[in-house]
Image (spheres, rainbow, N blue to C red):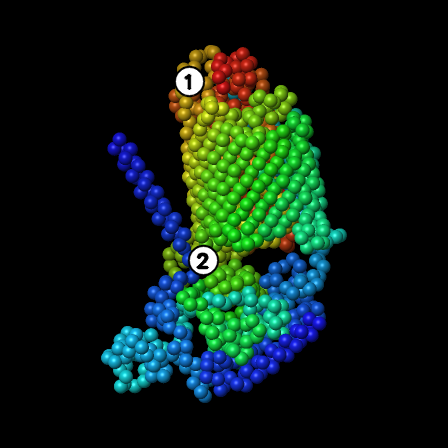
């Protein structure tokens, strides 16, 4: 009894450990930090979420006459902060940590003017307007119909100090208010277009989405300017890497970053990339190389893995739903299929053998497997296929006279169940008068 | 008139922009900060006008490519934005889709191969030899040591060839065995006997967009030999009429079941006629309601089958579903499943099935075990799958990629067989079992892949041990098969793959070992059989269309059930062309 109990608890521990392991591994590659996570990542960011009870204009008071840009909140002697009872006391005594939200160094008000931190920060997560649709902004026919022109990626993703070229840039800038204002300022906005005098047009109250760079991070270096054209001068379109951005209808949609397979497709092609920039040269993109198991280049970097990243071993078993989607494009790579998406599973399932169908499969191995999961066999084989073999005596049955005369005994003793797969014992064994027993 | 309105809007917009920008400097609100003037606003002609005059780059394949696959050439020069080309490229399809090239309308694939199966006699006696001192395997009378055969496939498919919306597909296979007079060969095959004629797996013509009315445009008609999926996969000669939209898929089909291996329909009631229908409504695609409702009905061999399903499509990557299948009005199978994609590479799949004794024995074409209504002339007589036992089946699979490299699959499952008033005793084709398995694959530097996999399974055999055999007499049969057969199974494998790139060259080596534990009512000790083997293959591409492949599959070590052979081996060489 004790041993049963110990065994039971041992199983429980195993199950818990396995569960913990699965959960831990499932968390791998979590895409973007949530808003709460982002707050932790950048504790010194201004917490907009804590100020949603105030009207936007109480801090963003518009640009001063003669100035070209909107003044930063607080430039008017911290008026926007000291007004009311919230932070007035903080500005009376020694500088509290609050000052670190905007200032690089904490000085008393009698000291030299403290320099400001850049805002928004160049690094760390950025707050995105919840109501932004790439799909709508890139819907050229729709925009043209309304306004007579359309925009492209580089109309918004400009460098802060760029003039009219991307040459020499390091990173494409995220659009700031200036970029938006060119079309959404009150005076410039087109019909049915949101205007910037209403912050809520884009910044939904309480909805904050912060996002950090998810792909170009860590020791990875990347320059958009180096990816405008390939070795032969062929232009590289934005959509080559950001393929599905045009379908994103909200900034809360998972944003498409670059895909390693796109990198591999070019960086493994000597017609497009010089040898010094091939995938085998880790230093092309990485400043450092890690040690240990992770020093092995990820599978996504391997030229042999030009198959999609989701084509894992699990995908080999569970691909039915993906293949059934109207947008599935199996035929692009699997050239044996016609590309027709209606009732065409047989185009693969009739010609591709599973891995376990080795030389002994037909005669020795398939039986126990069929007992386990007969429905798996029916994915490819109709019953005729089984009948065609099961109706033919196997090699062991020859010479037939000797086999019938008693030679079959040894085989039957070893695995009688195999006999019963073809023979109805009531009919063929006891019905023939040889064996006693007719109960099954 | 609409064009005039567009021009008017354009002018008004331009005037408004100019007017507002002139006042921007004096405005005190956050409206129009000074910044870089738009680089390309107002600088482009309308896309549809550009599209008509632009030339399509040579590399592009309009009509078939996604609009995101931009040609790498620079023949499109109007506009600075890269997306410009993208959008214009897409618009071209909307405005005036150019004809697809022949290479995209026609698919042609063939392969031609030769195989060699063999098993060298070991000189030992067979298990079935009643005289231990008697002759071993007699190659002159009952065994063919080597067998040569040729095989091939041909696939021809067309899409929109001759007429827009006309598709066709033909897939045929042949295998020709070297004729021999002996009774058996090393590796048995269904082609060993009187079956060598070419087989047409599929051959149909399909017409899309039969009607031009907007609502009837999704109608398609398919005629010929094709597979049908739904309640069960089967092949039939007949007609399918379907209506497919992303939200609704409806099809009705009818015809005669066909066989890939020449089994005629004379043993089926109704001569093999089959008729059925399927419907699937995806309410997510229609109204963003996360439900998918499906139903299918089918009649074959005087049996009626019906299946209905309801799936909760939590989002694009999580699907929770339940299905119920009935056979002749009685519940045959109930299923519940959860399929979730937690990330691009992490998936969880849970399936629970409950089969009743009213379920079919194998599939549509083998509903009953075959013992009662099959005659001696019915070839199904020798596929005795026993009574259908109620069974509860659970399967769980989890896959992910660890450390961005280690492709991991963990799976487990099991089944519990039950009994009800209609079934007593065990079935030769069913056993309760529990199994677990895992597989990993690691991509090493420069195109080398290492893999390992293992599976272990235990069958729960129960039953009474038989009475002690009496020498010299025919043993009595056991009361049931419940305590005989494979009781345990273990499999382990290693694989090594070298591939410098897709469609260039690939070499692989696989090694495996399988251990079976047998339980016999007639023996006091359990018996273990171990088999191992290896499979080696190389394939290379000549250009992008011709593939050559050779594969050698061999057992390593003796075979418990066939001591008369040293082992089995097969060699196959193949030439394949895809056009």
Q: Residue at x 63, y 64 (%)?
A: B90
Residue B41 visible at all: yes
Question: Residue at 52% of width from left, 38% of height from top?
Answer: B324
Which residue is depicted at the point 55% across and 34% down?
A: B326
Q: In the figure, is residue B107 to the left or right of A201?
A: right
Question: In the structure shown, which secondary structural element does the residue marked by tag 1 occupy?
Answer: loop
Measuring from the top left, give residue A276's x and y in whole percent: 51, 67
Residue A182 horizontal/vertical position (percent): 53, 78
Viewer-nearest of discs 1 and 2 = 1
The residue pinned by badge 2 equals A297
Callout 2 crowding tier (Cα within 10 Å): few <14, some 14–19, many ≥20: many
Q: Position of residue B279 (x, y in %)?
A: 60, 44
- Residue farthest along the right direction in this orientation: B162
Chain for disc number 1: B
Residue at the bottom extreme?
A: A66
Residue A393 visible in image: no
Q: Is residue A104 above or below residue B399?
A: below
Q: Which mark is residue B466?
A: 1
Q: Chain of mark 2?
A: A
Query: Looking at the picture, do discs 1 and 2 lie on one chain?
Result: no
> Are the residues at dot 1 and dot 2 in contact (C-beta closer than 8 Å)?
no
Up the image or down, A377 lies above or below B79; here it is above
Residue A322 rendering spot, x and y as whole percentages:
54, 49
The foreground one among A131 and B81 is A131
> Which structural element holds mark 2?
loop
Whether residue A350 sits left or right of residue B393 in the image: it is: right
Viewer-nearest residue: B143 or A360: A360
Dot 1 alpha-carbon crowd within 10 angstroms: few under 14, some 14 to 19, many 20 or more: some
Among the 4 quarters of the image, the one containing residue A347: top right
Q: CA distance from mark 1 to mark 2?
A: 59 Å
| Quarter residue A61 falls in | bottom left
């Amino acid at each position: 009894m004790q041993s049963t109990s110990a065994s039971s608890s041992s199983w429980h521990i195993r199950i818990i450990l396995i569960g913990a392991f699965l959960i831990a591994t499932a968390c791998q590659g979590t895409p973007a930090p949530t808003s709460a996570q982002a707050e932790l990542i950048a504790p010194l960011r201004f917490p907009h979420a804590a100020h949603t009870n105030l009207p936007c204009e109480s801090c963003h008071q518009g640009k001063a006459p003669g100035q070209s840009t909107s003044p930063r909140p607080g430039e008017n002697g911290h008026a926007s902060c000291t007004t009311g009872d919230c932070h007035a006391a903080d500005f009376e005594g020694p500088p509290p940590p609050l000052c670190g939200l905007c200032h690089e160094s904490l000085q008393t008000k009698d000291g030299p003017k403290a320099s400001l931190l850049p805002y928004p920060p160049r690094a760390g997560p950025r707050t995105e307007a919840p109501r932004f649709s790439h799909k709508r902004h890139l819907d050229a026919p729709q925009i043209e119909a309304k306004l007579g022109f359309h925009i492209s990626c580089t109309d918004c993703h400009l460098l802060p100090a760029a003039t009219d070229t991307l040459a020499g840039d390091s990173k494409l800038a995220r659009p700031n208010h200036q970029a938006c204002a060119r079309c959404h300022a009150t005076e410039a906005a087109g019909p049915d277009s949101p205007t910037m005098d209403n912050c809520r047009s884009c910044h939904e109250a309480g909805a904050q989405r912060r996002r950090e760079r998810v792909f170009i991070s860590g020791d990875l270096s990347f320059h958009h300017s180096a990816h405008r054209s390939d070795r032969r001068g062929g232009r590289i379109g934005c959509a080559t890497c950001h393929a599905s951005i045009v379908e994103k209808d909200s900034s809360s949609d998972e944003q498409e970053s670059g895909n390693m397979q796109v990198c591999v497709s070019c960086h493994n092609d000597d017609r497009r990339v010089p040898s010094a920039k091939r995938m085998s040269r880790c230093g092309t993109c990485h400043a450092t190389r890690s040690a240990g198991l992770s020093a092995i280049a990820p599978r996504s970097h391997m030229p042999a893995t030009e198959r999609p990243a989701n084509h894992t071993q699990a995908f080999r078993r569970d691909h039915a739903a993906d293949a059934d989607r109207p947008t599935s494009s199996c035929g692009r790579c699997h050239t044996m299929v016609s590309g027709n998406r209606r009732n065409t599973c047989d185009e693969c399932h009739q010609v591709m053998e599973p891995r376990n169908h080795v030389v002994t499969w037909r005669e020795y191995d398939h039986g126990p497997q069929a007992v386990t999961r007969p429905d798996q066999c029916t994915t490819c084989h109709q019953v005729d296929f089984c009948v065609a073999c099961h109706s033919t005596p196997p090699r062991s049955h020859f010479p037939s006279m000797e086999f019938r005369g008693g030679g079959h005994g040894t085989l039957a003793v070893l695995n009688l169940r195999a006999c019963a797969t073809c023979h109805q014992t009531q009919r063929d064994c006891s019905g023939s008068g040889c064996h006693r027993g007719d109960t099954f | 008139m609409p064009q005039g309105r567009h021009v008017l809007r354009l002018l008004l917009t331009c005037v408004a922009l100019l007017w507002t920008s002139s006042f921007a400097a004096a405005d005190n609100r956050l409206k129009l900060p000074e910044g870089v003037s738009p680089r390309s606003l107002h600088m482009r002609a309308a896309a549809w006008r550009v599209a008509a005059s632009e030339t399509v780059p040579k590399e592009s394949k309009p009509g078939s490519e996604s609009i995101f696959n931009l040609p790498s050439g620079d023949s499109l020069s109007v506009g600075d934005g890269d997306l410009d080309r993208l959008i214009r490229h897409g618009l071209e399809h909307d405005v005036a889709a150019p004809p697809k090239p022949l290479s995209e309308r026609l698919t042609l694939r063939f392969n031609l191969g030769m195989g060699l199966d063999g098993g060298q006699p070991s000189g030992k006696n067979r298990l079935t030899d009643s005289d231990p001192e008697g002759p071993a395997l007699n190659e002159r009378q009952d065994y063919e040591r080597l067998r040569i055969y040729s095989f091939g496939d041909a696939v021809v498919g067309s899409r929109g060839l001759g007429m827009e919306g006309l598709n066709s597909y033909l897939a045929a296979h042949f295998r020709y065995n070297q004729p021999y007079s002996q009774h058996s060969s090393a590796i048995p095959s269904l082609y060993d006997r009187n079956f060598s004629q070419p087989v047409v797996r599929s051959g149909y013509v399909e017409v899309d967009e039969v009607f031009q009315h907007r609502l009837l445009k999704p109608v398609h008609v398919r005629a010929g030999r094709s597979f049908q999926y739904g309640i069960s996969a089967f092949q039939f000669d007949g007609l399918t009429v379907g209506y497919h939209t992303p939200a609704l898929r409806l099809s009705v089909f009818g015809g005669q079941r066909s066989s890939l291996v020449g089994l005629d329909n004379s043993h089926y009631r109704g001569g093999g006629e089959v008729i059925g229908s399927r419907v699937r409504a995806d309410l997510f695609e229609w109204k963003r309601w996360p439900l998918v409702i499906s139903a299918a009905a089918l009649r074959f061999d005087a049996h009626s089958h019906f299946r209905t399903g309801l799936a909760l499509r939590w989002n694009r990557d999580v699907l929770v579903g339940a299905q119920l299948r009935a056979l002749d009005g009685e519940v045959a199978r109930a299923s519940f499943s959860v399929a979730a994609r937690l990330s691009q590479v992490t998936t969880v799949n849970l399936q629970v099935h409950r089969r009743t004794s009213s379920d079919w024995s194998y599939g549509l074409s083998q509903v009953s075990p075959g013992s009662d209504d099959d005659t001696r002339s019915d070839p199904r007589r020798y596929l005795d799958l026993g009574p259908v036992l109620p069974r509860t089946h659970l399967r769980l699979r989890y896959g992910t990629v660890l450390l961005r490299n280690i492709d991991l699959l963990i799976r487990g499952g099991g089944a519990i067989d039950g009994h009800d008033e209609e079934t007593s005793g065990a079935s030769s084709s069913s056993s309760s079992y529990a199994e677990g398995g895992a597989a990993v694959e690691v991509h090493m530097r420069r195109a080398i892949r290492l893999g390992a996999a293992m599976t272990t399974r235990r069958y729960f055999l129960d039953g009474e041990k038989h009475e002690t055999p009496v020498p010299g007499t025919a043993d009595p049969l056991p009361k049931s098969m419940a305590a005989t057969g494979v009781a345990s199974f273990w499999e382990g494998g290693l694989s090594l793959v070298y591939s410098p790139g897709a469609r260039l060259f690939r070499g692989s080596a696989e090694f495996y070992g399988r251990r079976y534990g047998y339980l016999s009512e007639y023996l006091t000790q359990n018996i273990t059989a171990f088999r191992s083997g290896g499979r080696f293959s190389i394939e290379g591409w000549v250009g992008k269309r011709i593939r050559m492949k050779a594969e050698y599959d061999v057992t390593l070590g003796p075979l418990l059930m066939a001591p008369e052979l040293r082992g089995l081996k097969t060699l196959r060489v193949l030439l394949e062309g895809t056009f």
